[in-house]
Image: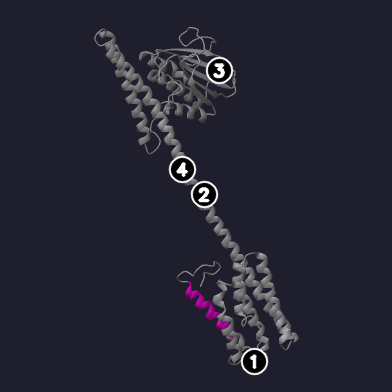
Amino acid sequence: MTKPGGGGPLPRGAWWREAAIMATAFAFCLLGGVIQVDDTLSAPPAAAYLIAVLSCAVLPVRHRAPLAALAATTAVGVLVPLLDLLLTPLIVAPAVITSYSYSLTARTERRAASAVLLTSAVLVAAIPLFGDFSWKDASRMGVVAVFPLVAGVLGHSVRNRRAYLAAVEERARRAEQSRDSEARRRVAEERVRIARELHDLVAHQITLANAQATVAAHFFDARPEQTRKSLKELVETTADALDDLRATVGLLRQSGDAATPAEPAPGLSRLSTLLESFRRAGLEVSVHQEGTARPLPPGVDLTAYRIVQEALTNVTKHADTGSARVHLLWNPDRLTIAVADDGEGSTAADRPPGYGLIGMRERATAVGGQLSAGRRPEGGFLVSAQLPLPPAKDTTRRTDGAPTMEGRTADGDTGDAP
């Protein structure tokens, strides 16, 4: 047996409801059979038992074949006048029940309405066609017609209510899935962002430490003073690296917001400090700027800083050269950054791209820009990025290490673009 209105097996605990429904319908049929055509009360005749048994035996089928059950109970109701019984809502109670069930499970509302209307019409028509019709019976015809219609309307209402609740549950389920997917996506993005930050931080500091250690080892015997200076710078570099790593890992370990404000994200205002760290590692860096510098959005400012940092780190690690050039071109709608060297090291285009180049491209793309990297025709390697800028305002600012005067370098000299 299937679940009412669902088409599946009845759950545990539903069998007693089916038995109660059948017993109630059977009692109503017998009670309707007590009322004779002459309005006298007597024991139910044998015809009433026959009607009750035939119509109630169909009720369990209404879950699998509701239309067939409705047709069968309607046909049994037509037999009521033929058996000299009074056609009342009580004696056709099974037809009322099947009208409700079919309205609840019909494929379309039109089919349900048509079937219930036809049931009412057939039951009403059976009174004058097969029984002794009188004007007194005319008032009962309306009552007999109303009960299946009311049952059909009730089934339609319950069906709409169940559909509404199912839709609400489905929307809630999809919303929960969307929240889970969004949470997973944000976690993945955050992991990539953290990995990118850690890579830029560690690669930069370790590269500088390696270069300073190399210088110290080279001058260990010949130039002790230079060795001590390089070792001192190495200590400072590693201390800075440890501080940065401690701050980053500390943020990751926190379960909530930080109790104290975090250090502002680096930007082009700290460009001179960044270049000085590379100069201490033995890489001479010149900066040339064109156009008027102006405040950058935080995301673009951090991206510009990280691109310069990573590009110079790659020069220090892979290029066989001691110099590099940084060119900043300020246009009304974009900032162009170019970092070039003339070395012949492993930063050439035939070298497989590492996480540094991938991270720079991801950063540029994240703020709506683009980045390219490859060998220059005249030799060396070039990293070029174009980052979008907001509309220019009347006020301008001077970035540390990048003055606003056209054609001036960071250290006061003029230079050529790479």
Left or right relative to 222: residue 314: right
Inter-mark Cα distance, 2 to 4: 12 Å
Residue type pointed to by label 1: Thr
Q: Residues within 10 Å of mark 4 (few under 14, many from 20)?
A: few
Q: Is residue 154 above or below residue 143?
A: above
Q: Which tag, 1 or 3, sits closer to the chain's start?
A: 1
Q: Nearer the viewer, residue 85 or 364?
A: 364
Look at 47% across and 25% down and name the residue there.
302
Q: Position of residue 86 (x, y in %)?
A: 66, 86
Left or right relative to 260: residue 33: right
Inter-mark Cα distance, 3 to 2: 45 Å
Residue interval drawn in magenta: 14-29
Q: Which residue position is annotated with label 2?
A: 175
Helix, strand or loop status at disc 1:
loop
Q: Which mark is residue 40?
A: 1
Residue type pointed to by label 3: Trp
Disc 3 and disc 4 in contact, CB within 8 angstroms:
no
Q: Position of residue 260 (x, y in %)?
A: 38, 30
Q: Which mark is residue 330?
A: 3
Inter-mark Cα distance, 1 to 3: 106 Å
Q: Position of residue 173 (x, y in %)?
A: 50, 53
Disc 2 and disc 4 in contact, CB within 8 angstroms:
no
Inter-mark Cα distance, 3 to 4: 38 Å
Inter-mark Cα distance, 2 to 1: 64 Å
Helix, strand or loop status at disc 4:
helix
Q: Which tag, 3 or 2, sits closer to the chain's start?
A: 2
Magenta residue check for 23: yes
Q: Which mark is residue 183?
A: 4
